[in-house]
């Protein structure tokens, strides 16, 4: 497979996305230069909206890793972290950010960079590698003020009032910490507006994804980078404007039956985080008439904020997020995958057995069985890693992808 | 082997037959992790049994879980698929590592038991965290009682007292070992602790009382031999590893294993009512890397090192164990600053490999003669 092959990004919005990504990281550096407090935090929680409402600058080290993978920075980061004793069996996000902050970041050798944190939202309540990333960051940036966050790791379908009460109390504790340490005051009207913008972004996201039910699908998983705004910009007008632009373009493509490839023969589902270092792999399927029209990971970033109380809404969002990208409820993930496969008229599922993420990979084989048993949808397991290309075999991938596509075409009489 | 040790060995080797025989009149509830409130399970009238992986092959589990999770967790599933845990009424998991969380859900998808339950424990010790902790324990009480349990304040108090006694007796053994007066091998100590995971607590307590009494009359008089080390890691079940370490010339004087000190320390907690005492003990549980910072673990590790006179640390985590492997570089850095030698050996099923032995011999040659 040619690694230099052109990416199959076809949305005009892809160009706007590149600018948005660059602008965001510039904004992070400028914030630091201007003395605006910079806080590093995990994604997928209500602290993001809170930061924007308070006028603080959020930075997401976890999101930095896919970017490093896309730009080819990971080998150097891995070299540094593995040299420090971090095992190759650990999550690639962890090894990448640990390597970055102890190596290239110190040396300032890349055009894109992260500013040093003034605040660290170090948390218990997500996956263990994400928690451990922040433990290392605390050690690396001893001058940063640390907030030890806590969230119940509970299945979405089991969230009860007691979990919500605790999440709200944690949100209030975070507000106290941020206002006391930065001197910023929380304007409730501004918070409500931020939460409203975040909810609007989620609604737009759902609408965009729904257009992928059209045949042919107006865009594929190769465009998954648009997720960047859902990770880093939730609660901003910029996210809503960008997603509106994407929605308009996608709607037009769907209505005019403009697909990803000339003839969409096979509709595919992707389970687990994609290989950030090479989304061009999806071309393998496209060359054989297959398009990835839905995936688990993109659906995890849209949580509607419908509570009247913005703090309660953010607490609920924080509670529900973890369920989407973990194994706290395999039942819910299975139900979500089955529903998506029905809704998007999926012919076959690609299950990425991802060495960098045990929490999402666990339960995948149960999902595979359910797909076959309940919907008669075949699937293929692809061994890989969302960050570390060394754990991925191109030859094996190519062979499995070709065999899988042949099977799917035979079933459809193509 | 000393006579008072035989019951521990017997339980460890034959617990599944014994459980099946007992299951006519008793109900068992399984658990993976030592953060699970076993006192509550016991107070509800069930016998808590920790799910052990044991040495063995993997035939069925690979169809449900990937190869890049620890051997222990894969083996627990293998045994469940072989119907070795069909006698359990339920399985309970306190959320610690991600893999254990995934495994209980995979069990739930594939193994029919009356109930499954995960306790989403708080990470903090704030008053709000304790209030929340209480609410999830109350939810757990309701679930236990809905499945035939009969937990009351009185039964919980009795169970707390029983477990307090057990933990105190184990702590006596550990203190003797740290002082160089324990006349047991490292393999014997591990046997005693592991047996506690699978023996009904009343029976276990009786055996411990006899053992501790016997050892108080039979203290080691010949002076310590071997290079004193602390063993750090997760769940270590392979008894041969302990024998191998001693044969190589090490003397294990302390540990922070999940199948060692971390399973019983501290012995109890403070509080106005039984639930508060249980909460207090859990939040002060000897820290597991799946929930705590290396920075917070290190001083406690050093307390153990100094208290027992250890001159080195052997890290024995399970291969693929994220919590331990992620903490290792920070712990190693801190140990280097203390001038304390250490070595990391990732464990799979086979016990110590030849490569492990060679590295240990080299470690001993370099540091053992100082």
Image: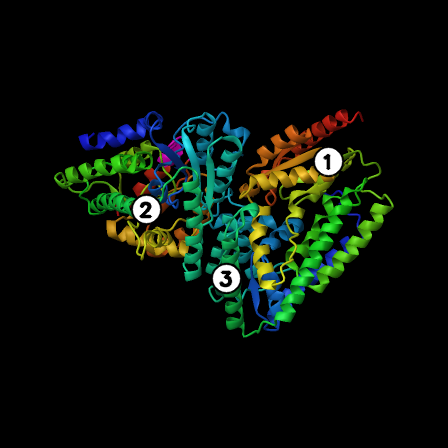
Chain letter behind tag 3 = A
Q: Which mark is residue A169?
A: 3
**Label 2 close to label 3 by CB (< 8 Å):** no
Is B1 in front, or is A77?
A: B1
Of marks 3 and 1, the one in the foreground: 3
Range of magenta residues: B348-358
Of marks 2 and 3, the one in the foreground: 2
Question: What is the quadrant of residue B191 in the picture?
Answer: top left
Is A133 in front, or is A154?
A: A154
Disc 1 crowd, CA 10 A, few/some/many (<14, 14-19, 20+): many
Check chain identity for marks 3 and 1: say if they share one: yes
Residue ID for mark 1: A346
Left or right of A157 on screen, residue A214: right
Is B107 in front, or is B183?
A: B107
Q: How far separated are the C-alphas under marks 1 and 2?
A: 52 Å
Q: How far separated are the C-alphas under marks 2 and 3?
A: 29 Å
Q: From this viewpoint, is residue A303 visible?
A: yes
């Amino acid at each position: 497979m040619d690694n230099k092959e052109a990416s199959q990004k076809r949305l005009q919005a892809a160009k706007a996305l590149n600018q948005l990504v660059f602008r965001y990281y510039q904004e992070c550096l400028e914030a630091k230069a201007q003395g605006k407090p910079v806080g590093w935090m995990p994604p997928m929680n209500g602290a993001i909206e809170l930061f924007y409402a308070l006028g603080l600058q959020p930075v997401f080290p976890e999101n930095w890793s896919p970017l490093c993978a896309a730009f080819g920075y990971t080998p150097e980061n891995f070299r540094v972290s593995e040299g420090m004793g971090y095992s190759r069996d650990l999550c690639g996000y962890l090894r990448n950010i640990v390597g970055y902050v102890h190596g290239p970041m110190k040396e300032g050798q890349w055009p894109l960079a992260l500013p040093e944190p003034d605040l660290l939202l170090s948390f218990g309540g997500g996956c263990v590698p994400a928690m451990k990333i922040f433990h290392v960051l605390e050690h690396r940036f001893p001058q940063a003020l640390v907030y030890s966050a806590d969230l119940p790791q509970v299945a979405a379908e089991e969230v009860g009032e007691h979990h919500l009460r605790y999440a709200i109390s944690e949100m209030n504790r975070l507000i106290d910490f941020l206002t006391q340490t930065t001197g910023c005051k929380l304007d409730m009207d501004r918070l409500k507006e931020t939460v409203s913008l975040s909810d609007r972004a989620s609604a737009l996201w759902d609408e965009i994804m729904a257009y992928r039910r059209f045949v042919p699908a107006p865009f594929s998983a190769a465009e998954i980078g648009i997720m960047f705004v859902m990770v880093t910009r939730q609660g901003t007008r910029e996210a809503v404007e960008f997603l509106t632009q994407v929605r308009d373009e996608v709607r037009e493509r769907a209505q005019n039956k403009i697909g990803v490839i000339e003839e969409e023969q096979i509709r595919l589902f992707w389970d687990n985080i994609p290989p950030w270092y090479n989304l061009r792999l999806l071309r393998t399927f496209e060359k054989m008439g297959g398009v990835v029209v839905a995936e688990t990971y993109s659906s995890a970033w849209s949580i509607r904020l419908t509570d009247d109380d913005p703090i309660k809404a953010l607490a609920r969002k924080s509670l529900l997020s973890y369920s989407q990208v973990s194994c706290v409820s395999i039942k819910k993930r299975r139900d979500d995958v089955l529903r998506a496969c029905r809704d998007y008229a999926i012919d076959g599922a690609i299950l990425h057995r991802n060495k960098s993420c045990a929490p999402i990979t666990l339960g995948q084989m149960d999902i595979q069985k359910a797909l076959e048993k309940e919907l008669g949808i075949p699937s293929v397991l692809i061994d890989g890693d969302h960050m570390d290309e060394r754990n991925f075999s191109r030859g094996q991938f190519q062979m499995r992808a070709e065999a899988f596509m042949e099977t799917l075409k035979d079933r459809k009489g193509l | 082997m000393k006579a008072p040790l035989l019951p521990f060995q017997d339980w460890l080797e034959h617990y599944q037959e014994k459980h099946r025989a007992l299951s006519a009149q008793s109900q068992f509830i399984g658990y993976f992790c030592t953060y699970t409130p076993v006192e509550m399970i016991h107070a509800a009238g069930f016998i808590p049994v920790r799910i052990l992986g044991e040495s063995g092959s993997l035939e069925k589990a690979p169809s449900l879980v990937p190869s890049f999770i620890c051997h222990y967790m894969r083996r627990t599933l293998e045994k469940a698929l072989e119907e070795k845990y069909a006698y359990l009424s339920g399985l309970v998991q306190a959320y610690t590592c991600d893999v254990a969380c995934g495994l209980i859900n995979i069990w739930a998808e594939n193994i029919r038991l009356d109930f499954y339950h995960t306790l989403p424990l708080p990470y903090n010790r704030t008053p709000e965290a304790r209030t929340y902790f209480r609410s999830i324990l109350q939810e757990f009480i309701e679930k236990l009682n809905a499945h035939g349990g009969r937990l009351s304040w009185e039964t919980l108090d009795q169970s707390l007292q029983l477990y307090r006694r057990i933990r105190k007796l184990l702590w006596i053994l550990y203190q003797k070992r740290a002082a160089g007066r324990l006349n047991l091998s490292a393999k014997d100590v591990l046997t005693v602790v592991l047996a506690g995971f699978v023996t009904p607590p009343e029976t276990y307590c009786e055996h411990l009382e006899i053992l501790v009494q016997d050892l108080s009359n039979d203290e080691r008089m010949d002076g310590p031999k071997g290079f004193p080390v602390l063993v750090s890691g997760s769940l270590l079940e392979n008894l041969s590893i302990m024998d191998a370490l001693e044969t190589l010339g090490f003397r294990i004087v302390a540990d922070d294993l999940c199948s060692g000190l971390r399973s019983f320390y501290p012995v109890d907690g403070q509080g106005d009512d039984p639930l508060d005492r249980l909460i207090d003990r859990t939040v002060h549980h000897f820290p597991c890397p799946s929930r705590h910072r290396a920075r917070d673990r290190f001083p406690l590790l050093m307390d153990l090192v100094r208290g027992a006179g250890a001159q080195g640390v052997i890290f024995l985590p399970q291969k693929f164990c994220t919590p331990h492997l992620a903490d290792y570089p920070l712990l190693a850095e801190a140990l280097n600053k203390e001038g304390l030698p250490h070595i990391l050996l990732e464990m799979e099923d086979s016990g110590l490999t030849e490569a492990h032995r060679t590295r240990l011999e080299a470690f001993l040659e370099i540091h053992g003669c100082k």
